[in-house]
Amino acid sequence: MFFSPAEGVEIHNRDSTWTPEQWHEMAEVSSNDDSSDEKEVDVHVLKAYNEAMTRIASLTEQKVKHVSVRLSKEWEEATANEKALCLDHVEEACRAVCNVIAPRDSEELLQAFKTPAVNEVCSDDLITLITAYKQAPSKNLKTQILSIYAPRYSARFLKKIHEPFEKLSDRQIKKARAHAKNVGAGFNLNKMPHHRVRIDLVKLDHFLSFVDQPYFYQDVAYGTRTLKLDSGDHLVMSNVIRIVGRSTMIEQYLKHCCEEDFDPLGKSTLYRILQVREASQRWSLQGLDNTAVSGAEGFEAMHKIVKELEEGGATEKWCEEVRRTLKDAKRYMKTDCAQHWYTVCAILENLLGNIKQIKPTVNEVFLRSDGAGCYHNNNLIAAASNVSTRVGIKVMRYDFSEPQSGKDVCDRIISPMKGAIRRYCNEGHNILTAADMHEALKVRQVKGSSAAVCEIDSNRKEVKIKRINNFSFFHNFAYEKDGLRLSKAYGVGKGKLIPWSELILEKHGPVFTSSEELQDHVHLGKHSEIKASESL
């Protein structure tokens, strides 16, 4: 007797004609014997199990199916049908056992057995986090809470403790762990807003550069608007009036694009852009003047006060007299009240004097203003040369804007000052005189501006000059050594020269007797010094 190369197989007869095929035949016979033994064991085990479950089921009304086959492979390798069949047998067996142990509440016992004992395996902190996760209203908040404890436990344990109220997927666990690694455990992820841009930025900039021209808009001295920036800051700016309609602006822009051979945006898109760019549209010329708007509001407020006093017990005679006085005052402001050239001359002398004190190196100045009657007149043009002599700053030129234009530049400067005075008045202070306005601007200073209260010598209002014929036709005046050079348009032709001896018959004296000035001037650093002259 000897052993073959296959361990455990005996060969009783040694044959000289033995071949490997005979060995394979003997191995198959041996394996068949082993499988038959396993089947006998399975039959015996299944018979014992089925008999036991039948006896247990007979004690209750629960029916239990017989198990006909055992699972001979690993659970992970089993098919879905095999797993489902095994789970059905297990549930039936457990239900039958629970009916025997707790006949009155077998279902509660079965659920308690199936539900993991979270309180026994979890700490108090973990239970609190799980409760917060369960009550979280959004997915982002759930991910934020899960990121606190997801890195500390395995995925199987996390699924087990979340199973009673919600199934937890592998993707949710990975997302929570990535959140804890990249953002921080429990930290909120601040998402930056990303706006989807469907407009060609080159075409948009081309259109905006066209419509931002001063021809289409005009600044006014009354009213402000607040712009809210993306950073959350609020920027207060003066009000803007659109003096050209949207359709006119778009038609001119399309013609401009045809001339430049530029492909513009569509008409509907252009209208939408102008709709987003808010601007008040001027419907008529009435109300654009600073005095008219502010004065009308003041008279309306006083009429309301008189009405309230009348309702409160004031006599009818007194109320009628006050209303008549207000009506006469309003008519006076619209007709007879006009700013005199002498006031403008006083402002000019005060302004140049302050500039000379702040920057003594300034020796020349160029003036420009709109064509209002208080500026564009013979007296002021002639008196400006005498002002430059007294102050020490030579007036080189005085240029006027085209008719009905140029006032918006001054309105843009005066609007913040009016807003400061209005806020000072809203705080409970009275604004009745020029000194009150000076005090308001002293308390609420406006960057880049100054204020002064001056007493004018009214005895020197008259100036002896020779009138210039057709003065309203000229808009540009150059102060030369030999005289005053007049021209209708800037840089066109040589102009007309009038000698000083033929223009000024008697020099004009100082206009101030006293002056109290606000010296808190602010230099914005926007002025550049030039060797020949300096621009202010």
Image: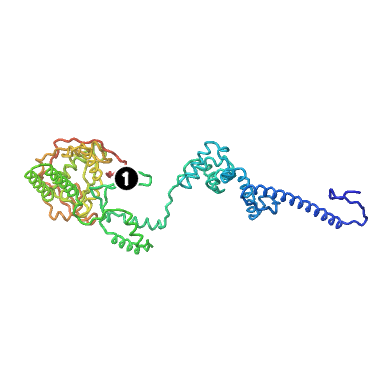
Can you say which quadrant of the picture contains the C terminus? top left
Mark 1 packing: few (<14 Cα in 10 Å), some, or many (20+)? Answer: few
**Residue 378: horizontal and vertical position, in percent?**
14, 49
Q: Left or right: 364 with respect to 231?
A: left
Question: How many dots with numbers?
Answer: 1
Q: Left or right: 134 with respect to 452?
A: right
What colour scheme governs how the chains and residues are painted in the rendered image of this protein? rainbow
Q: Secondary structure at mark 1?
A: strand
- Camera-side residue of 329 and 467: 329
Eyeballing the image, is 474 above or below 532? Answer: below
- Camera-side residue of 503 and 423: 423
**Residue closest to the far right:** 16
**Residue 144: horizontal and vertical position, in percent?**
49, 43
- Camera-side residue of 387 and 454: 454
- Camera-side residue of 438 and 401: 438
Residue 303, can we see it? Answer: yes
Residue 155, can we see it? Answer: no
Residue at 80% across, 53% down: 31
**Residue closest to the far left:** 317
**Residue 437: horizontal and vertical position, in percent?**
19, 39
- Amino acid type of disc 1? Leu
The residue that disc 1 covers is 235
**Residue 287: horizontal and vertical position, in percent?**
19, 52
